[in-house]
Amino acid sequence: MRITRDDLISIIFLLPLYIFIIVMVFIPIVNVILGSFGISLFGEKSEFTLKGYNEFLASESPYMYSLFFTIYISLIATVISIVAGYLFAIYLTVKKPPIWSKVSTVMTIPLFTPYIVGAFMWWTLLWPRGYISLFVNGILMRLGLAHEPLPLVNDPYGIGILFGEVWIRFVIAVSIFYGPLQLINPELIDAARSLGAGTWTIIRKIFIPLTKYALIATSAIVLLATMAGVSIPLVLGGSWPQFLNVMIYLDVTTRFNYIMAYTSGVFYIIASAALGYIFFRFTTKKVILQTR
Amino acid sequence: MYGERRQRLWDLLVIGIVMVYILLPMVVLVEYAFAEKWYAYQLYPSQWGLKWFSWVFKHHDTRMAFLYSYTLAPLVMLTTLALCIPAGYVLGTKRTKLSIFTENLVNMNMALPVIVIGIGLLPLYTRLGLLGNYWALIPAHMIGAIPYTLRSVTAAFMQVPRDLEEAARVLGATKLQVIRKVYIPITWRGILAGGIFAFSWSLNEFILTLLLGAPAVKTLPIAIYEYVGGYYLTPQPAAALSIFILLPSIAIALFFEKYLQVSLGLGGG
């Protein structure tokens, strides 16, 4: 095979990027995978072991509990964000409210808000003196459903994490859904209406089938981002149960239990690979093609 | 007529609820930042002022956090662009198998959780004596910035018509003239957008700085975290600090929306 001058230029121009990815991404990931088996890439004392996996998968393991808690809360946050975001994007598409063009920029603010600031903002609303906490607990106690204020942040149920995550993911969902929904032929909706279809029938029979790949891809990316983000569970989560990534952070900074951090990291890599594959598989072609 | 009015009321209700939902956390943040006196039994502050902003500037740690954040961000922007412009040129102008493979490889990075890369880098940084090193945070911040910047720069180079470069060459333009007269006028917007993405990412980056930089190098997000995530909770200085990082972020969002017609999530982990 002959390398042309063009190929050589391409290689020279791409080389710094490849070196960067190898050093800053590939080697760390290999280090995490090998480290989960007790093998070190950087010359520390290493010995092959399955201790990390045995401890992770043991019955009543805090790591398994954390993994389930992470998946459970992330799934709830994803469902809320996707359903609310999808319905809102449909509302904007169908009703085309004139006021929207004046306020649509506001929707982009959470996209650019640092997660740590977003988490802190929700903390100020949810801590015992926060407006939402006072409002919700006031209603619950007045109705006799609670005898003492319910903790809405740093709580064991993940309520605080849900508030923080949904605020950001809802906006991401609306931004992604809005594009594919605009590509649906409005005559289809008019035809369905004139044949007597109600709003829910139109959503079920027209919108969902024509945007199902966008729905799958967005759900995958929202779930992945929710599972992987550290700032929100770190600030809004409770002392127990914790998100798996918070466990990883505590393992390397306070418990110095590197093998467990690496083992948890491997579970994250597997989840990311699966969800990332779904996202890129459905976003490369089908999201656009299906609606045309 | 009645139906139209009812529809307008519905629009106001639905969009109003969404706007309150989006803006309420920010309103409360501003309230905390400007609250000089706010007793536990009061619903809102009894005295407003700039006390917490001056408090922020009086402390060495927070002053350094400003310095670190706002010097790291332009450095990350420049180094990311230095890496992404040549790569983006290849990916945008030569659609070969290598280009597509490179794009997929970079996209794959976007799916990897930053904390996993961070704990993988930790022993490498320790071994090289780079923990807590200001300069070593630049490549760490670039990890998250590169996929966004590269996309933007690649898209910019894709807009350059192949024939335009060839026509310029046929007419005797030198390589430098082709870059100056053909490439720069068409690609500057995309390159600028890519640079601002990198700047914004660095300003917001949290977990890698926490793992690889702190406690020696604390940026603004780390300083905010220390006020709310530690054992003592002091929301007022954290709110004042947040304003300094939120305002540039909002300005960048508005700039993108108005001048570059793009929007993208840049939460920074």
Image: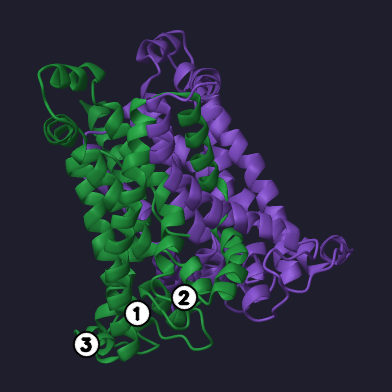
Chain colours: A purple, B green
Mark 3 → mark 2, Cα distance in angstroms? 26 Å
- Estimate the x, y position of residue A20 in percent, counting from the top left: 48, 52
Q: The disc numbered 2 marks a residue on which chain? A: B
Please tell me which of labels 1 and 3 falls first in the chain.
1
Please tell me which of labels 1 and 2 falls first in the chain.
1
Q: The disc numbered 3 marks a residue on which chain? A: B
Is residue A247 shown to the viewer in this render?
A: yes
Q: Are marks 3 and 2 in contact (CB under 8 Å)?
A: no
Which of the 4 image quarters holds residue A94? top left
Front residue of this view, candidates B259 and A142: B259
Identify the image quadrant of the N terminus of chain B. Answer: top left
Please check whether the numbered discs 1 and 2 fall on a single chain.
yes
Which of the 4 image quarters holds residue B62? bottom left
**Residue occupied by mark 1:** B43
Q: In the structure shown, which secondary structural element does the residue marked by tag 2 occupy?
A: loop
Is residue A142 shown to the viewer in this render?
A: no
**Residue occupied by mark 3:** B54
- Estimate the x, y position of residue A242 in percent, counting from the top left: 66, 68
Q: The disc numbered 1 marks a residue on which chain? A: B
Front residue of this view, candidates A71 and A13: A13
Instruction: Check disc 1 and give the amino acid type.
Output: Leu
Q: Are marks 1 and 2 in contact (CB under 8 Å)?
A: no
Q: In the structure shown, which secondary structural element does the residue marked by tag 3 occupy?
A: helix
Instruction: Check disc 3 and give the amino acid type.
Output: Ser
Q: Nearer the viewer, mark 1 or mark 2?
A: 2
Q: Is residue A51 left or right of residue A44?
A: right
Mark 1 → mark 2, Cα distance in angstroms? 39 Å
Q: Is residue B246 above or below residue A213?
A: below
Q: Is residue A214 above or below residue B255?
A: above
Q: Which mark is residue B213?
A: 2
Q: Are marks 1 and 3 in contact (CB under 8 Å)?
A: no
